[in-house]
Image (tube, helix red, strand yellow):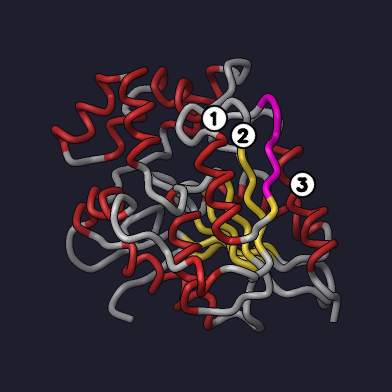
Amino acid sequence: MPYELEVIARECDGESSYPPLLFVHGSCHGAWCWDEHFLPYFAERGFDSYALSLRGHGESSGPGSLRWTSIAAYVADVEAVAADLRAEPVVIGHSLGGYVVQKYVEKHDPPGAVLIAPSPRRGMRSVWLRSSLRDPWPFLKMWLTLDPYALFATPERCHRFLFSPDMDEETVRRYWSRLGPESVRSAVETLGKPPDAERIRGRPMLILGAVEDRIVPEPPLRATAEDYGAELTMIPDMAHDMMLDTRWTQAADAIHDWLLRTLTAA
């Protein structure tokens, strides 16, 4: 591989009897967003846990311009990291990373997949329309600059779109300072041909939504769950960045419960 991918690993004490977990971040984030809470949480509960930064994010390098990077390229990054793990991982993706995971599951047969506030299968068109009517300027600026980061370009926007109102401003600013640019091509591709539901349906899958999400509301998540025959769980009093939000343990507990119900220990 002509570029390096950042992978953060938090492995459990001793030998795990479960498949490893591989976490895929969403737009403008990096592997760091999982290491705040989720990686240590799951490692403490017996799961070898890994998070990658997709090319051009975090500490990962990447060929060419990030602006024109495709979803297929991001899927290739997930494939490269998964191939180096001791076993096929459970893949867990947030937001745009949830869409990347859907495309990954089209081609692979992981023991499970978790989509956290994901870009829905049927596309982001209705989601963006709803959000742009409510907050027109950030979305207009996103298309003028061809950079989805415009949605989160100030701490105030970051707080409004990603976090609950009761998150303290110091924490919001700390997370905001770690956000970065994103591929506009990948955003546009979520409007195109949807993942193949026939290839994915029947695979063990949990879709996790946040009731107070200002980006991805419940209806398209419910449609995605119906398309895949997946389990849908909506977490109350949470915003879009469920792995970082003030009540992140509710999301982690829901995933942990699903994993224990779904996976067969070796």
Image x and y of residue 132, in percent:
31, 25
Q: Which residues are magenta?
A: 232-237
Placement of the N terminus among the 4 image quadrants: bottom left
Q: CA distance from mark 3 to mark 2?
A: 12 Å
Report which quarter residue 75 is drawn in.
bottom left
Q: Secondary structure at mark 2?
A: strand
Task: Name the mark on residue 202.
Answer: none
State yes or no: discs 1 and 2 in contact (Cβ < 8 Å): yes
Image x and y of residue 164, in percent:
59, 22
Image x and y of residue 169, in percent:
53, 17
In primary-sequence order, the first of circles 1 and 3 is: 1
Q: CA distance from mark 1 to mark 3?
A: 17 Å
Compared with 122, 244 (above or below) is: above
> Residue under circle 3?
254
Q: Secondary structure at mark 1?
A: loop
Q: Amino acid at mark 3?
A: Ala
Q: Residues within 10 Å of mark 1 (few under 14, many from 20)?
A: many
Q: Amino acid at mark 2?
A: Ala
Compared with 50, 184 (above or below) is: above
Q: Residue at x 62, y 64 (%)?
A: 113
Report which quarter residue 144 is drawn in.
top left
In primary-sequence order, the first of circles 3 and 2 is: 2
Q: Residues within 10 Å of mark 3 (few under 14, many from 20)?
A: some
> Residue under circle 1?
213
> Residue under circle 2?
210
